[in-house]
């Protein structure tokens, strides 16, 4: 049957896949052309609120190591969450911080999945900044 490490790898793969599945579905909606500027702005603000909600809800969880892992992202994202702007440079900078945190993290799969969830929301937010 499965040994312990194979089982853990399979579980972590399934968890990451389940976290990414909603983003794959919602990215299709972001690719839909929008001609109305108000709708573009509304779509961006909704995506930005989703990214901030993912960060804040993750930071409220009582998981060992999660608060420390999210600290650099939280520090950078606070200003963005207070006043979201469709600035691709700012969003890419936030994504870079999340990517670096994910790459340097040796925490549990659960902690890494929360960081990945914030990264995916930021990626979706970035997609909404492109004017179609």
Image: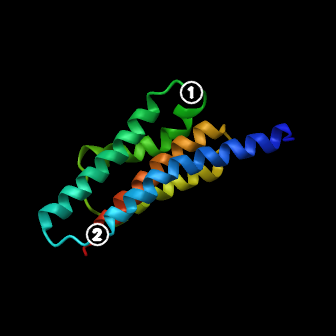
Q: Is residue 131 visible?
A: yes
* Mark seen at residue 40: none
Would you name the residue on which mark 2 appears? Answer: 32
Which percent across, then down, holds residue 127? 35, 65
Front-lying residue, 5 or 106:
5
**Circle 1 residues within 10 Å: few <14, some 14–19, many ≥20:** few
Instruction: Tell me: residue 60, above or below residue 16.
Output: above
Q: Is residue 5 left or right of residue 87?
A: right
* Mark seen at residue 63: 1
Q: Earlier in the sequence, mark 1 or mark 2?
A: 2
> Which corner quadrant of the image does residue 34 belong to?
bottom left
Residue depicted at 60% across the width and 37% down the height? 110
Report the mark closest to the observer, 1 or 2: 2
Q: Is residue 90 visible?
A: no
Q: Is residue 33 left or right of residue 23?
A: left
Residue depicted at 83% across the width and 37% down the height? 4
């Amino acid at each position: 049957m499965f040994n312990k490490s194979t089982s853990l790898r399979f579980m972590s793969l399934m968890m990451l896949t389940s976290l990414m599945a909603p983003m794959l579905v919602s990215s299709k909606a972001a690719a839909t052309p929008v001609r109305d500027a108000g709708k573009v702005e509304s779509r961006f603000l909704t995506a930005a609120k989703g990214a901030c909600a993912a960060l804040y809800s993750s930071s409220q969880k009582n998981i060992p190591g999660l608060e420390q892992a999210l600290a650099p992202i939280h520090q950078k994202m606070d200003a963005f969450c207070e006043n979201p702007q469709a600035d691709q440079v700012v969003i890419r900078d936030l994504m870079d911080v999340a990517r670096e945190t994910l790459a340097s993290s040796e925490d549990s799969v659960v902690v890494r999945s929360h960081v990945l969830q914030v990264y995916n929301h930021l990626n979706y937010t970035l997609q909404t900044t492109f004017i179609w």
